[in-house]
Image (cartoon, helix red, strand yellow):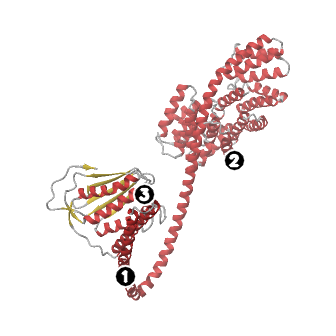
Amino acid sequence: MKFWIVAQFIFVIAMMLVPRGAMALCISAPTPSLRSLQDEVYRNPKSALAQIEARFTPNSPFTDRAWLHAIAASAYGRLERAEDQQREVAAARRYPIPPDSDLEAHLVIQTSQMAGLPDELQHAKALLERTARRHATGSPAWICLRASLGSVDIRSGRIGEGGAIITNAFQSATLHRRDAQRFGIATDVAFALIVSLDFSTALDVIDQADRYAADRGFTMERENLAYFRGNIAMRQSDFEHAVVAFEAARDLATRTGDEQGVAYADLQLCEARLERGQFDQARRACATTRRLFALVHRLPYGRLTWLEARLMIADGHPAGAIARLNSLIGGKNPSSDEFIVTQSHLARAAAFEALGRNGEALRDMRRYMDRREKALEGNRLQAIAAMRARFQTDLREREKVTLEQRLALTNSELERRRLWLWSIGVAAMLISVLLGLVICFGRRHSRTLAAHAAAAREMAQAKADFLSNMSHEIRAPLGSLILNAQMIADSPDMTDRSRAVARRMDRVGQRLIDLLDDLLLFSRIETRHVPLHDAPFDPCRLCLDIVDGVRDRAAGAGIEVHADIDDKVPTTMMGDAGKITQILANLLDNAVLHSQGRTVRLHVAPAGPDALALTVEDDGIGIPESDRERVFQRFLQVDGSRHGHGGSGLGLAISKGLCELMGGSIHVGSAAGRGTRMTVRLPCRPSPSEAPGRESSET
C-alpha cells in the first residue's frame, strides 16, 4: 500500500508538469485593453482567441501586434495546443522587441514552458537566467522569470532548488505588493509545496489564489486549482474530497469548453470513484474519457487502459482484463509509464488468480515485486529530495515572516515620519507666534538666566569642594581600616575564616578608595579644574608599562593583552603622560572587564604631524549601535543597569572628559557580537630632539 501511495504521487507530479498556460497575468500588458484580453485568457481562452483575432489590423502599432501574439500564445497554452503556441511565440519574436522589456520576458517564459527534453530544459534555464539579469530585482518581469526558472529546475529533477527559487519569487511579490504576480505564480508555489510534502501550506496558497480568481472570474485558473485540491486529496487517500474537487474541475472545464480539462477530470474521477468502490460511476467516467480521447491526443492511454482493466476484474471479466493488460505490459503498444507497467503486473496476477491460473499469477506477482523493489530505491531518493525541499521551504517561510515584519516596520516608520512632518509644521507655526513673545520678554529673562547660571557655577564649585573635603575626611579612617584588615590577615593567630573576612575588608576598602578617587577626579573634570602638564615622554615605554600593569589582571580572566606600536611613532613626544596613562588604563580595564572575549589589543600610531591615535580593540560581545552614545554616561552600563561587572562606572566618562580637556576626542566603533574598538586622538607634538623613527614593536 505504501508503494501504491508513493507511485500515485509520482504520477500526480507527472500530470501536474503538463503546461497549463504561460502566466497570462504574471506579466501585465502595457494598455488596459490588452490587459482585459489577458484576463479573458483566464476566463475563457477560446473567447480570448476570437477577440485577439478581431484586434489584428495592419495599422496597429508593432508593439500591440507583438503583445497580441504573446497573449494568443498564452491562450493556446491554456488549451494545450503546443504547435499553435510555438507559432505565436515565433511570430511575436519577429517584431523589434527591446531586450529588457516585459514583452521579451513574457516570451522567454513561454519558451521555457514549451521545453520538454533535458537539453531543451537546460537551454530554457540559461535563457531565463540571462533575461532575469536584465531586469531590476523585485520588478514584475524579474519575479515571473524567477518563478519560471524554479519550475524548470523542478521539471529537471532539482526539486529542492526549484522549490526554493519559486518560494523566493512568491515572497518577493508579497514584499513588493505585486498582487497580480503573486497570483500568477501561486500555482507554481503550490506545486513546489506539494512536491515538498507540505500539503497544509499548499492548500493555504491554493485557497488564497482561488479567492483572487473567484473575484475576477478566472474560470481556467480555478479549474487548475481544483485539480491541485483533488491531487492532494488523492495523495492523502481522501477519495471523497478528491471526487468533489475533480467534479468541480470538470464543471469549470465544461463551462469554458476545455475538452482537455474535461478529459483529465473524467480520468481522475474514474480512478477516485474506483478507489471508493463506485464502479458504475467510475465506468461512466472512463467511458467519457475514452470518447474524448479522439479530441485529446495528450491523454495517457496506458492509464486509461489500466483503469478499464481493473473495472473489468471488478465486473467478473478477468479474461478481457488480461487482454487489455497484455497490451500495456508487452503488446503492440506497451506503456512507457513504469508505474502503469508495475501495477498492470499486479492487476494481471489478480485476473490470473480469478481464472485459477495460479502459476501465471505467481509469475506476475514476482515480476511485480521485482519492479517494486527497484522503484523503492527511486522513491527513497525522491523522499530525500522532498525532505530537502521541505527544509528549504521552511527557511524561506521564516524569511517571508521576517520580510513581512520589516515591511510592517517600514509602514509604521512612514506613518511616524508623516506625523513628525505634521508636528514640525504645527510646531513651526507655534514657534513663529512664540518668537515674538520671547523677543519682548527676552531681556528680562536673560538677566534671570545669568543669575541662575552664576548660581549653578557656584553650586558646582561647592559640590567639588564638598567632594574634595569629604574624600580627605573619609580617606583617613578608611586607610586605618585597610591597615588593620591587612594586619589581621597577616596575623598567625587568626583563623582561616577571620583572615578571609579581613582580606575581603581590605579589597572593599581599596575599592572605596578607588571610587573616591574617581569621584574626585570626575568632579574636577566637570569644573574644568584639572591641571595639564606638558612635558616630554616616551609613548612606546608608556604604553608598554600600561599593558604590563593590566596583563596580570587580565590573565586571571583568561584574556591576552597585546600592544602594537607603529614604527612611525616618535620616540619622544610632548604631552601630559599622566592623563594619557589614566585614559588608556581606564579603556584597557573596561575592555578586560566587559568584553567577554579572549584578546584585547592596544594599537598606537601617528594621527597626523601633531597627533597620536590610541586604539583599544577587543573581540568580545560588542555594543549595539543604539547604545554607543550611552557608554560615556555616569554609572551606566550598555545593558542599562547601574551595577553588573564591578568598578565605579566612571571610567569611560573620566576618559572622555580628560580627552576633551586635552583637546582630543574619543570614538566608539562596535557592533553587537563583533567586538568593540575605542579610538582616542590626542594632540601630541614630537619633541624638538626627536629621532627619525623607531623599529615596529609588538608585545
Can residue 560 be seen here? The reply is yes
Q: Residue at x 16, y 54 (%)?
A: 692
Q: Identify the mark nearer the N-term, 3 or 1.
A: 1
Please say if the residues under marks 2 and 1 sit with CB atoms less than 8 Å apart: no
* Disc 2 versus disc 1: nearer the observer: 1
Q: How many marks?
A: 3
Residue that numbered label 2 is attached to: 211
Mark earlier in primary sequence (3, 2): 2
Horizontally, is 152 left or right of 577 in the view? right
Mark 3, residue position: 594
Residue type pointed to by label 2:
Arg
> How far across and how far down the image is residue 654, in percent?
36, 67
Callout 2 secondary element: helix
**Of discs 3 and 2, which sits in the foreground?**
3
Kind of residue indicated by mark 3 = His
Residue 72, above or below 332: below
How packed mark 1 is, by other alpha carbons closer than 10 Å (few <14, some 14-19, many 20 or more), is few
SS for tag 3?
Answer: helix
Circle 3 residues within 10 Å: few <14, some 14–19, many ≥20: some
Towards the viewer: 212 or 4: 4
Q: Is residue 678 above or below residue 158?
A: below
Q: What separation in Å lies between label 3 and label 1 (alpha carbons)?
A: 34 Å
Amino acid type at mark 1: Ala
Identify the residue at the far bottom of this view. Answer: 444
Residue 539, image x, y percentages: 24, 58
Q: Is residue 46 above or below residue 594?
A: above
Nearer-the-camera pick, 634 or 245: 634
Seen from the viewer's position, the closer of residues 522 and 139 is: 522
Answer with the quarter of the image where residue 541 lies: bottom left
